[in-house]
Image (cartoon, coloured by chain):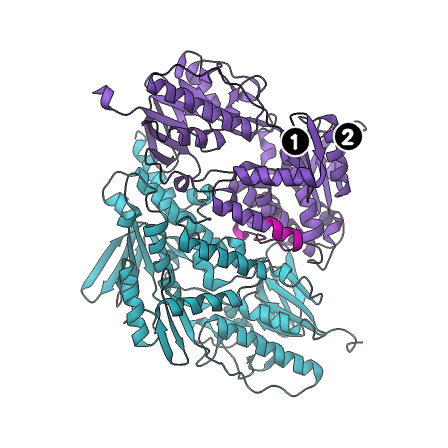
Chain colours: A purple, B cyan
Amino acid sequence: MAGSEPHRVVIVGGGFAGVRAATRLAKSGAEITLIDRANHHLFQPLLYQVATGLLSEGQVAPALRSMFRSMGAVRTLMGEIEEIDLEGKVVRGHLLEELEVPYDTLVLAAGSEDSYFGHDDWEQWALPMKTLDHAARIRSHILGAFEMAEQEPPGPARDAWLTYAVVGAGPTGVELAGQLSVLTHRVLRDEYRAFDPADRRIILLDAVDEILPSFAPSLQRRAHRDLEKLGVDVRVRHKVVGVDDSGLDAEGPEGHVRISAHTILWSAGVQAAGLAKILGAAAHIELGKGGRVPVGPDLTLAGHPEVFVVGDMADLEGVPGLAPAAIQQGIYAAKVIAARLDGRPAPAPFHYVDKGTLATIGRQRAVADIKGIRFGGPVAFALWAVVHLFYLVGWGNRVGTVTRWLWSLVARNRREQVISVTSLLSDRRVEERVQSRVDDSEPV
Amino acid sequence: MAGSEPHRVVIVGGGFAGVRAATRLAKSGAEITLIDRANHHLFQPLLYQVATGLLSEGQVAPALRSMFRSMGAVRTLMGEIEEIDLEGKVVRGHLLEELEVPYDTLVLAAGSEDSYFGHDDWEQWALPMKTLDHAARIRSHILGAFEMAEQEPPGPARDAWLTYAVVGAGPTGVELAGQLSVLTHRVLRDEYRAFDPADRRIILLDAVDEILPSFAPSLQRRAHRDLEKLGVDVRVRHKVVGVDDSGLDAEGPEGHVRISAHTILWSAGVQAAGLAKILGAAAHIELGKGGRVPVGPDLTLAGHPEVFVVGDMADLEGVPGLAPAAIQQGIYAAKVIAARLDGRPAPAPFHYVDKGTLATIGRQRAVADIKGIRFGGPVAFALWAVVHLFYLVGWGNRVGTVTRWLWSLVARNRREQVISVTSLLSDRRVEERVQSRVDDSEPV
């Protein structure tokens, strides 16, 4: 009877690795269950464009169900896995409903989350940008800060609403700082009457020696100059040591620095998703750096050839936490599983192919390192745009995105400048401000 | 000195009436302050397309600041007015900051809000659709209900997640029911493994004798038939008498009806925004039907020629609560104010010009009544589309919207199928479900 039952593959995580694995296995004869906390795939590299109002949420986040509509062997479930039973071969969790899903093969691809270096209390003040909800909250917060500034009299309180600190100078931080500059300098210009949006301060901080640490020094310097041309105050060798309700503290080469800012965006560090800890406890293994799971050359867990760990959750020497690496690992895991199902020999060990790295800085500026060929400027930007469009899911999203990009070159308007009033009023800093005013006005 | 100071016009509300008034007055020499709770104008007639995932939030809600960027005389403030001091000529309120704005002329254009006929407790279960936040919540709820259904075993609980009740058969309710049918029958088809989305029930209820009560009987019948062809269960002469956590109760021609439904959308009644009450108390006047403010033929408040009430807040015989009426009133108030500033005689009393009414039902179906010429079908639909594109703000939004409409004719995908996990988990019904499960599983 067991022979007639289809092989059950459970994939946890609908990011780059999980989606590629599911797609590759859709016709393998296996029965695939894809579980994710959200109902959508997320094209993380363009998330900062949602946070800054250029793209809509749907444009970077196609519904997982739509993606797998024609692949009948793949079912998707919204859920959060809280228990992995390696002996019983079942995962358990919940979100909407209690979930208990048995597997023959398990692929863990839950990705990464922001790390606050042991200071989880910073998160309430230093906004993370990992999920679509985060990006929407950042958009409401950034635009809301300008609304606050329009109503505050000139002075330190207003200056704090006009100060944006981005912590972490990897590609995400650099892209975010660059886009913030474009948004405030170009898009929002002339929209406020009480102040000039160009007077805002954007400060990019990182403890590293130079921004974009994974890039070659010549490109780092170029990106650094590009950011400064955009008016971004770049502070490398600044380690953030405190974040609170009115700003942050850093230690720099010239000593202690205090920055009063009501907008702090966090892209400083990542760690493996919490699922890694759950797996570590279940398998009695020690996790690697950033809480990642050590895996063998075939991306499986030691002693559990039926459990794959792929993408940002996996700890593999020489493999960066980037979308192309996650894609390659997802495809590789699917190949191994398909080979086993077909009784074919296992493929050669996983080998990461570095096709190059790209980062964009504001409008029409980017840096590229393609197998040692390093360049910047409009050509790098064009390459960046083509590559990102290529990996975006769905023709509709590609056409829509390229249309908005082209539109943004000629027009200053951005489509998505909606502040969610609900979100803004539940924003900790706005809440504090409103509360302090109420406290002031009430008789004792 | 008073002569050299610019005349201060304060407009409360950034809807159709307020925006038109501000635009018309931008070059009058007056200093204009536009106050709204949100930072965006809202193109209400297309809001249901946001709720059903066809359009993005930004496409129907341009930022007010962007709209008035080039009009230096207009400043916009986010705020909610809580006090009108007619003697001191000042409005007070807050939202982000304490607001106190003095005026020489006041234009009140805060629109309408949903009315639950004295049962405000129904709102937690019967979702209103007046703001962008409402539409986003409805989208998360509708798609979330299908996610719940995918995980529930067959039975009454699952059926309740697959039952959508729309209360109120005016244009909004009809459009919403029609789009729900298209969404579930066409867009989401083949996306679920545990059930067929076409098996959902969509029930449209209203106490009226026929749907679209403001339309001619021939068009009502046509729209009724169109909806039934789309699989909508149309129940006129059904008065909703109760709404609770698992459904609703109605009284129909055949007696009491109980509908178990986890999605209830409310478009049954409107009343003037709360600001009307504040004005009524300040001016010691009695409000008209639906809490609207009685105004004179020049749209001003009796005894207060400097206070205009326009749009859905105004109680004017023979003027419907529709966008074209609000637009005409906003423009009229601006003309009166401009004439006073220039020392010209006042324009003739306000006269509403009925240019016709349109309502759409699902895909490529609509009914139109243009000065007594009544028709339906694709021609009415094309007219509906052209008219709505014409009134949409901004070329970018027009191009983007028409692109998505055309795309939706050929492709089944919809761009905006994002569930906000934060929003879904704070949804009362989902909360209840999750809570009841926790209660069940915990030992007593």
Q: Is residue B385 left or right of residue B178?
A: right
Q: Which mark is residue A170?
A: 1
The C terminus of chain B: image quadrant: top left
Q: Position of residue B127 (x, y in %)?
A: 39, 55
Q: Nearer the viewer, residue A382 or B130?
A: A382
Q: Is residue B423 left or right of residue B96?
A: left
| Chain letter of disc 1 in the image | A
Q: Is residue A411 magenta?
A: yes
Same chain, labels 2 and 1: yes
Q: Which residues are magenta?
A: A405-422
**Residue B235 visible in the displayed image:** yes
Residue that label 2 marks: A256
**Residue A268 visible in the displayed image:** no
Q: Position of residue B209 (x, y in %)?
A: 27, 72
Q: Nearer the viewer, residue B372 or A341?
A: A341
Secondary structure under tag 2 reads: strand
